[in-house]
Structure formats: structure tokens, C-alpha cells
Image (cartoon, rainbow, N blue to C red):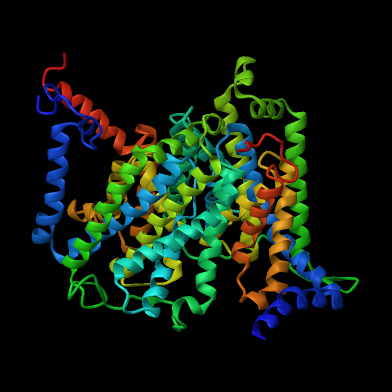
Amino acid sequence: MLYRETGQFKTSYVADQAIFPIRQDRYLAAAALVLAYVAVPILGTEYWLLTIMIPFLVFTLAAIGLNILTGYAGQLSLGTGGFMAVGAFATYKITTSFPGLNIVVVFVLAGIITALVGVMFGWPSLRIKGFYLAVATLASQFFLIWMFNKFPWFNNYTASGVISAPPRAVFGHFFVTGAEANPVNKYLFVLTVVVVMAFIAKNLVRGRVGRSWMAMRDMDIAAEIIGIRPLQTKLLAFAISSFYCGISGAMWAFIYTGGVEALAFDIDRSFQILFMIIIGGLGSILGSFLGAAFIVLLPIWLENVPRLLGVNIPVNYISNTQSMVFGALIVFFLIVEPRGLARLWQIGKEKLRMWPFPY
Amino acid sequence: MEFLDFLQALFVTPFTMMWQNPEFLLEVVIGGLLTGVMYSLVALGFVLIYKASGVFNFAQGTMVLFAALTFVGLLEHGVPVWATFILTVLVMILLAFIIERLVLRPLVNQEPIILFMATIGLSYLLDGFGEIAWGGDVHALDIGIPKEPLVFGGVLVNEFDLCAAAICGVLVTALAVFFQKTSIGRALRAVADDHQAALSVGIPLKTIWVIVWSVAGIVGLVAGILWGSNLGVQFSLSLVALKALPVLILGGLTSVPGAIVGGLIVGSGEKVAEVFWGPATGGAIEDWFAYALALVFLLFRPQGLFGERIIERV
């Protein structure tokens, strides 16, 4: 009834190729944007913005990055954390060496550096795939974190090994990093970056590049025979994925936490992001959003729900209970819907088309 | 000049050190072998499960930790050692039942990556459960393995290392006999070869899975006891699982002897790298040496030392 494409005729190629071909989807997307840009900054408290919205958006970006590599191009990677660390440390080195450079430019440069590192570590993907590749990317994860830990050049010889974000503004006094930045500015900046990059990613995966990735994922030999070059396609996937992860890591370090050490990007971070795309849905940009939201919100729920229910869990059991529930939920989700939340959304849309008259 | 020093420390000093003091080199290698035995045992659990069910069991490390925690917890409650061992084995078999029923069976026919993720979820679950049940402190474990240092021709060897090697040897022999001589073992090998063919000649796949997960659990228990009596039972045990991945690459994913040899190579290799090349690179290269080694192997010999040449090449 409400969600039906009947009567919406496409009369031009442009209309046919729109990201949201159905009017209701367009309204929904516009409403989400208005909500995110207007309602959240006005209504959201500082706690909401800083501990829920910003990490959610930062993780979303990393999840999109990994989804491009794993979900679309089919290259399993466990090195996401390492690439995020490259982004964070590259940003730090660039912005402390050239304080005058605009932070947006710095982020882009850091992303490009991460992309180069990603291509370097993606090289083995030309010969191996599946779990073998996963182990190869583990090498990048451990090596990169070790490198950032061991060589004090990367953190400008601070004793603690922590890189802390210097104050930087996008324009004028619109500070997004450092102590002066207020949460709303930070939030709006992160939101804009994520929206723009998600838009780019969505268009990438719909176009020639994305289709060649998917062909490579589904059957590499067939893809090669119809004229897709494996070398360029795979390395491009690694480069773009790392670009996204790098910028996500930079925002994690500079905007979300304000100061991190290399260990913040350890193997657990990689698994966390892998969980996001599995739970959200492999090969879906929307799924990256849903998965990131799920993983960010889950610990908060797990902390608050027992308290609201009046159940008192002793302090020393909380983290263990959390990890238990987390593990159980992941197994449960994989059993119920292995193709993720994005698939649930799709099923829901199918149901809505019929509703309320199912015949 | 600094760069030249670095090159010297990287390419010259380690080798002169080795040349001048071969006993020390041998000691380092033997010391690394013990760690290698641990890696081997964890990797062995991986291989068993991978061969029989095609599942890449990330939770193997957590199973080692869980088994060791259960063992230590029961010991601390005053249960005698032999009864503890039997009880823990029963717990691991029960665990295998539960995993098969609640995780593997509903996920049958899913893609490998989904199963892999499920085992990661499983490892979180077991981690939390084990620590709630037995507490998260470091437990000391002493089941009477002697730890006296011995001297063989100028080389210092720990008695404990010898015991560990002996236990590992016995375990592998027992497994080999089990796989080669018993009907269950033959069924296991059939399943590993071809699931469908095994099913069609009447081998019950579900039972086989329970058995193989139990065996992996028992191997994990042995690894946990050995590792625990050396370093105490603690959380870091579960991290050994990640080290087992490069071991598998080195030895070949489907080969039991490969897991053993790969573990020994990785264990002593990373110790040698740490001791001789550590000073040049700032230390702690143990953390990634194994993975770098695996990477090199992947590029030149992707099937590992003993693996079957079935790896899908691109």
C-alpha cells in the first residue's frame, strides 16, 4: 500500500539508473539525511554524539572499505586494523609536519598513503585467495602495528607512544579536532565525510569497476576470460578499500578519540569490522551502515539492559557476560540470516509491497 | 653511517654471533622448539577439524584455554589429577556435542567464511563462559613434570622441554594409530576425503563431527596442560590460535605431520629471529615473524611443506 512502485514510470535513462529508483526510497533517504543533519545535532546530547553517533559513522566508513574488498571483490582480509592505523599515523605525521595544510587535504593524503600500503600488502592476492589470503593479510596487521609501536619517528618521539590530535579547522573557526572542537562540529564533519564517501562507494560498485569486482569475486577465471584484468581489478579493490579504511582510522584517532596508540588498531579491531560486514550483509553499502550500528550499539545495550531490568551483574562478570552474549548473538545471527541485516531489510521491503493485501 | 650500522646489525652481526657460539644457537633453537610444540598441538586441532568438516576453527585457541581452565579449576577444588583429566575430557566431549548440535548443524552447507565467523563468535562465547566459571586470574598449574635443566655436550636443555616433546610424540603416535587402525579413524579419513561419498556409503557425518571436535578438544587439553604448567593458565593462551595459522600455511592445511613440523619451524625460527635479529630491529619481531614467514611460503609454495596440491590458484 505505502511502499509500491505501481504507476511510477521511468521515462529516461537517467531515471532508470537512479540510486533510488522508487519514490518512497527517495523520500526515506531524504528523511534520513534531514534527521541526521538537523534533528540529531539539535536533539542529541553530547554523550549521544560523542559515544554513539561518531563511532558509528567512523566504523561505517571502515565497514564500507572492508565491504568493497571482501563483499564486492571477494578478497578476505584480516588487516583492516593495520590499514586504519596507517591512516591515523599518516594523518598525524602530515599534519604535524605541515600545520598549515587543511585537515581535509591531510585526510585525503593519508587515505592515498594507506591505499599505497594496501596495494603493497594486496600483492599476494594475485596468487592466493580465501583463507590463505586471510593469513597473508594477518601479516600486514601484525607487521604494521609492530612498526608503529617500535619506531618512535611515527609518533614524533613522544614517550607514551600516543599520538594526540592537534587542533585543526576545516575552515575559519570550524574546529573538528583538538580540545576546542565542539561535538556538533565533529559530528557534522564526520557525517559529511561518510555521506559523500558512501555515495561515491555506491556509485563505484554500481558501475564498471564494481561489476568487474563482482565478476572477479564470483568466478575469477570466467572474469579473466571476458576481459577483466585480475591484476588491476584486485589491486584497485585493495587500494580503494584501504583508502576508506585509512580515512576511517584517521577519523577514529583524530575526531573520535583525539589520541590513540597503535594498539588501538590491533587484531580485535579487524575482527570487529569483519563482524560488522557479516552481520550487516556482505556486498551491500546499506549493510555496512546497519552492521556498524549493530556492533556499536550492542555493548551499550548489554551494559544498560540488565540495569534497566533490575538485574545486578557483579562488576567483574560484566565484561565476560558481554563477550558471552556477543558471541552467542553472532552465532545466532549467522544461523538465522547468514546474509545479514541488509537481506532482512530486502525481505521487509518485499513484504511491504504486498501489505496489507498479500495476494 | 647509521644506516651502515643498521645493515651490519642486520646482515653481519647475527651470523658472526652464530658462528662464534654454536652452542648458544642450539640452545635458542631448542628453547624455541618447546613453543613450537605448543603451536603444533594447537595447529593439530585445526587440521583435524579442517580435514573432517572443512571448518576453519578459529575457536581452537579458546578451546585450549577453556580445557586448561577447566582442568586447573577442578584441580583447585581438590579433585585428583587422573580424575580431573577424565572429567575434563568428558567436558570437552560434551562441548563437542553442544557445538555440533547448536552451531554446526544449523549452519551446514553455508559458505566457509560464515562458518569461520561462527567459530569466532564461539571463541568469544567460550572465553566469557570459561572466565565466569573459573575466574580470570592466572592459575599456576603443576602436575609434576620435572623442570630441572640438563646439560648435553655443553648445550643446556630443560627437562620440561623433553617431557613436552615426549608427550607430544605419544599423542601424535596415538592419533596416527587411531586414524590408521580403527574403524572410526577410517571413517574420519573417508569423510576428510569426500563428504558425499562418505555419506553414501553410510558413514554418519554428524557423529563423525562430534568425534573429531572431541579429539580436537582433547588435543587442546594436552596443549593447555603443557602450556599451562610452563607459563600458568591465562588468557594469552587463546592468542596462540592466531600463531597456529602461519603454522598451518607452513605445514599445509591438510597434513598432520605438516602441522607438527610447521610448528617446530615457526617456534624455533621466531626465537632465533628474536635473539639474533631483535637488536637490529628494536625487538618484539616474534609478533609478526611467523606471519612474514607464512607470507613468503604463500608466494613460493602455497600448498605448504606437506599439503596436498589442491590449493586454488588465481
* Residue at 40% across, 45% down: A68
- Above or below B78: residue A202: above
Q: The C terminus of chain A lies in which quarter of the figure?
A: top left
The image quarter in which residue A17 lies: top left
Q: Position of residue A80 (x, y in %)?
A: 45, 55
- Above or below B175: residue B294: below
Left/right of residue A59 with respect to residue B137 in the rendered view = left
Left/right of residue B143 with respect to residue A162 in the rendered view = right
Q: Position of residue B305 (x, y in %)?
A: 75, 46
Q: Position of residue A278 (x, y in %)?
A: 39, 42
Q: Nearer the viewer, residue A64 or B143?
A: A64
* Residue at 15% across, 49% down: A33
Left/right of residue A43 with respect to residue A47 in the rendered view = left
Q: Residue furthest bottom?
A: B1
Q: Residue furthest front?
A: A12
Q: Position of residue B303 (x, y in %)?
A: 69, 42
Regarding residue B74, the answer to whether it shows in the image is: no
* Residue at 44% across, 83% down: A158
Regarding residue A308, the answer to whether it shows in the image is: yes
- Above or below B34: residue A227: above
Q: Nearer the viewer, residue B284 or B64?
A: B284
Q: Residue furthest right?
A: B153
